[in-house]
Amino acid sequence: MADIKFLITRELGVLGEGSKGWQKEINLVSWNDRKAKLDIRDWGPEHERMGKGVTLSKDEAIKLKQLLEEIDLDSMDIG
């Protein structure tokens, strides 16, 4: 399997932390020397390992923001 090259160009925030020290983060990440995209995933300490996540283009991030603003999360039965 080919190595995946990544560079976190901007750390935007931590959404939560797991029991083993991994953090769910939202960052701008450049994958394989491409333009950075919005990225949400779990990261190990010091960003040496990562879990599965989702990477969004600017248009997808704008749409996600719009959808989240429209949703009444208090009315949902989510954990």
Image: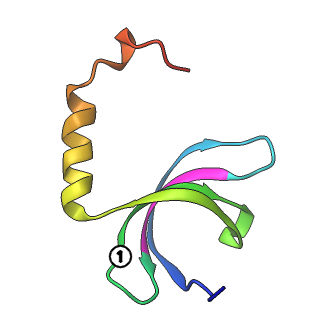
Mark 1 belongs to which amino acid?
Ala
Overall secondary structure of the magenta stretch?
Answer: strand
In the image, is 24 to the left or to the right of 65?
A: right
The residue sitting at 47% across, 12% down in the picture is: 77
Most foreground residue, 23 or 4:
4
Quadrant in the rendering for residue 5: bottom right
Q: Is residue 28 magenta?
A: yes
Mark 1: secondary structure: loop
Residue 65: which quarter of the image?
top left
Q: How is the image coloured?
A: rainbow
Q: Quadrant of residue 76?
A: top left
Residue 15 in the image: above or below residue 43: above
Q: Nearer the viewer, residue 2 or 33?
A: 2
- Find out whether residue 7 is within the magenta segment: no
Vertical order, 77 against 64 (above or below): above
User: Label 1: which residue?
Assistant: 36
> Is 76 left, or right, of 65 in this rendering?
right
Q: Nearer the viewer, residue 42 or 8?
A: 42
The range drawn in magenta is 23-29
Where residue 51 appears, x then y in whole percent?
A: 64, 59
Q: Residue at x 73, y 63 (%)?
A: 45
Residue 64's place in the image compared with 70, above or below, is below
Which image quarter holds the N terminus?
A: bottom right
Percent x, y of residue 39: 43, 61
Q: Residue at x 36, y 9 (%)?
A: 75
